[in-house]
Amino acid sequence: MKNKEKYAKEIVEIVCEGCALAVSKETGKPVKCVNIKCSECTLGGSSMCSTMIKEWAESEYTEKPVISKKDKAFLDCLVEDFKYMARDKINALYAYGKEPYKSNDGDWWSENNGRYYALSCYVNVAFPMIKWEDDKPWLIDDFEEAGGGGRI
């Protein structure tokens, strides 16, 4: 489902009121442009807003991840060197410094043997939404936008 399909009602209401459309960074939902600052809009306040809103509307809708308090606390302790997380074929969870790619042998690999760290030894770390079947790794910043806090 595309964003324009998910938010059709909200988009129509905003446009019918004669307002320009924006997308809240906090919620990911369409809002009236006049109600938020450019810095709070996913479109970045660029002069290309109309082009960017079309790209947003045509892109696939994705649910923002909701993480547990324990996972949020873990993210607060994870150093900023780690940018991605993925799970291997045997369900072990890893954090990576560089974007890894999925191999055919059941692992994720980072170019030039990029820095990675096994997280499965932390019994309180769950991140159940991260699965081997994922086509790409999860960006840790996406979890922070979902309430994961800041990292050291």
Image (cartoon, rainbow, N blue to C red):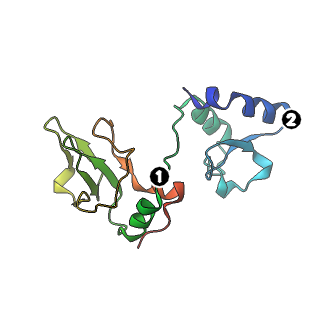
The Cα atoms of the two marked residues, 1 and 2, are separated by 32 Å
Q: Position of residue 66 (x, y in %)?
A: 50, 50
User: Residue 17: which disc?
Assistant: 2
The residue indicated by pointer 1 is 142
Quarter holding residue 55: top right
- Lateral position of residue 96 relative to residue 59, left or right: left
- Lateral position of residue 145 relative to residue 39, left or right: left
Q: Position of residue 2 (x, y in %)?
A: 56, 28
Identify whether 142 is placed above or below 136. below
Residue type at mark 2 is Glu
Determine whether the residue tagged by mark 1 lies in a helix, strand or loop: helix
> Going 35% across and 53% down the picture, which residue do you hit?
126
Q: Position of residue 59 (x, y in %)?
A: 53, 32
- Lateral position of residue 34 relative to residue 7, left or right: right
Identify whether 43 is placed above or below 80. above
Q: Where's the C terminus, which quadrant?
A: bottom left
Nearest the viewer among 8 and 54 is 8
Q: Residues within 10 Å of mark 2 (few under 14, many from 20)?
A: few
Determine whether the residue tagged by mark 2 lies in a helix, strand or loop: loop
Quarter holding residue 81: bottom left
> Going 28% across and 56% down the picture, which residue do you hit?
96
Nearest the viewer among 69 and 84 is 69
Q: Residue furthest right?
A: 17
Quarter holding residue 82: bottom left
Q: Position of residue 26 (x, y in %)?
A: 62, 53
Q: Where's the N terminus, which quadrant?
A: top right
Q: Residue furthest left?
A: 105
Identify whether 10 is placed above or below 90. above
Mark positioned earlier in the residue sequence (1 or 2): 2
Q: Are marks 1 and 2 in contact (CB under 8 Å)?
A: no
Q: Residues within 10 Å of mark 1 (few under 14, many from 20)?
A: some
Nearest the viewer among 119 and 95 is 119
